Image (cartoon, rainbow, N blue to C red):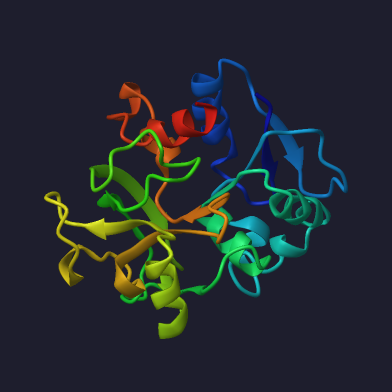
Amino acid sequence: MNAAVIVFPGSNCDRDVKVALTASMAREPMMVWHDEARLPKTDLIVVPGGFSYGDYLRSGAMAAHSPVMREVVKRAKAGVPVLGICNGFQILIEAGLLPGALLRNAGLKFVCKDVWLRIDQIDSPFTSAYMRDSVIRIPIAHNDGNYFADNKTLERLNGDGRIAMRYSAPDGTVDAAANPNGSARNIAGVLNAERTVLGMMPHPERLAEMALGGTDGRAIFDSLVG
């Protein structure tokens, strides 16, 4: 399996993703700089977290127009799985690969802590190694993670099984108390219509081996390899 990690000026989780992918694939992914106009043949693309272009203008807005993103969009539309994590989620929305918007956190403060997630959809290349309704612990670190979409879009996402995961209590209860950023319906990750693109705000690569304090995030990468 070949994987590519896209690197932008300001990316700071690209190497963490590289380590997590290497552990799951038993080979290193390609690291592709943002101004590359072409992508090598690849079976998976990851757009990592960080602060691409310093989050100027709007988080992910400038990165979405990098030369490499034209090829990422093309590959995504051809069915290549694409995973966007945190800033990567913002970039995928700005590039038109996922619906909705990511607004400032409801508390207007940067949030950095572990949260609980309930896995709502396992019928995807990203979540198949989990059990439906399983609850996992994953770190978040973002300022603009408040997922917003109009009610029609939210109903469509819910009805089509495209809400991959939601912020929850440790017992899986989804309520306002478990919502760290104000996201509509506690949404932490969404899929495209074909379920080949996933955007998620939590950082699975930061909890993918015991040296980091747990392995709840590793199944995201194992799912993609399996």
The quarter holding residue 63 reads bottom right
Q: At 73% from the left edge and 33% from the top edge, which residue is drawn?
A: 42
User: Where does the image place residue 210, in percent across and percent down from the top left?
Assistant: 31, 23
In the rendered image of this protein, does residue 73 appear above or below residue 16? below
Q: Quadrant of the N terminus?
A: top right
For the residue pair 170 and 192, the one nearer the viewer reads as 192
Horizontally, residue 162 falls left or right of residue 216, namely: right
Q: Residue furthest top?
A: 26
Residue 149: x %, y % from top left:
46, 79
Horizontally, is 145 left or right of 111 in the view? right
Instruction: Where is residue 117? Give x, y as percent.
Output: 27, 51
- How many numbered marks are there? 0
Q: Is residue 37 visible?
A: yes
Residue at position x 62%, y 64% in the image? 60
User: Would you place residue 27 above or below residue 199 in this image?
Assistant: above
Name, please, the residue furthest toward the left.
Answer: 171
Residue 77: image quadrant is bottom right
- State the image coordinates of residue 49 (x, y, percent, origin top left): 54, 49
Q: Give the residue displayed 26% in from the left and 43% down from the top.
A: 137
Instruction: Report the side of 142 relative to 65 (left or right).
Output: left
Q: In the displayed orientation, state which residue is furthest to the right.
A: 37
Position of residue 90 in the picture relative to residue 203 (left or right): right
Figure check: 190 above or below 154:
above
Q: Is residue 148 visible?
A: no
